[in-house]
Image (spheres, rainbow, N blue to C red):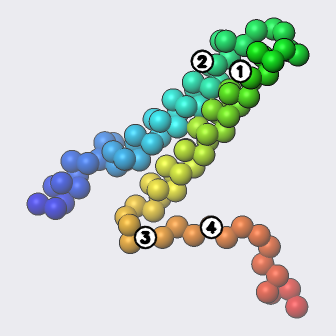
Amino acid sequence: MNETLRRDKRVAGIEIQALRLFLLAGAIYGGGAVGVEHFTDSEENSLHYNMWTALEEGMEMLGVIVFIYALLDYLRGSPERVVRLDIGIDTAGDS
């Protein structure tokens, strides 16, 4: 029965939660890239332009952050599994 419930919570092999996060990330990013771009005018040194541009760039960055979170959450798979990222240079072997 538990396996049946687990299969029902997947769409095309992707869990519903991850799928929702992927779609949310795309909507935020696309809304910033296309939707907010519509409201910016050609006056590049005006406060109006700078505020809309800041909103656009912020939405794009937030969309990427949500996408990375969704990707890591999807790769983790289950609450018992841990994803670990080591960023840096390993200097332990350089003696």
- In this orientation, does residue 13 appear? no
Tell me which residue sits at (49%, 49%) in the image: 70
Location of residue 74 (image quadrant): bottom left
Q: CA gap, disc 3 to disc 1?
A: 41 Å
Which of pointers 3 and 1 indicates the residue nearer the eye? 1
Task: Kindly give the residue lying farthest to the top in the view shown.
Answer: 42
- In this orientation, does residue 57 appear? yes
Say what amino acid the circle numbered 2 marks.
Gly
Say what amino acid the circle numbered 4 marks.
Leu
Location of residue 76 (image quadrant): bottom left
Give the position of the N terminus as an image quadrant.
bottom left
Q: Which residue is mark 1?
A: 52
Is residue 50 rendered to the left or right of residue 36?
right
Q: Residues within 10 Å of mark 2 (few under 14, many from 20)?
A: some
Say what amino acid the circle numbered 3 marks.
Arg
Q: Earlier in the sequence, mark 4 or mark 2?
A: 2
Task: Kindly give the residue lying farthest to the left in the view shown.
Answer: 1
Q: Which residue is mark 3?
A: 81
Circle 3/circle 1 CB separation < 8 Å: no
Instruction: Indicate the secondary structure of the residue bearing disc 3.
Output: loop
Q: Position of residue 6 (x, y in %)?
A: 23, 55
Q: Which residue is mark 2?
A: 35
Q: CA gap, disc 4 to disc 3?
A: 13 Å
Is residue 67 rendered to the left or right of residue 43?
left
Tell me which residue sits at (88%, 16%) in the image: 45
Q: CA gap, disc 4 to disc 1?
A: 35 Å
Q: Which residue is mark 4?
A: 85
| 84 shown above or below 58 | below
Q: Earlier in the sequence, mark 3 or mark 1?
A: 1
Say what amino acid the circle numbered 1 marks.
Trp
Instruction: Indicate the secondary structure of the residue bearing disc 4.
Output: loop
Q: Earlier in the sequence, mark 2 or mark 1?
A: 2
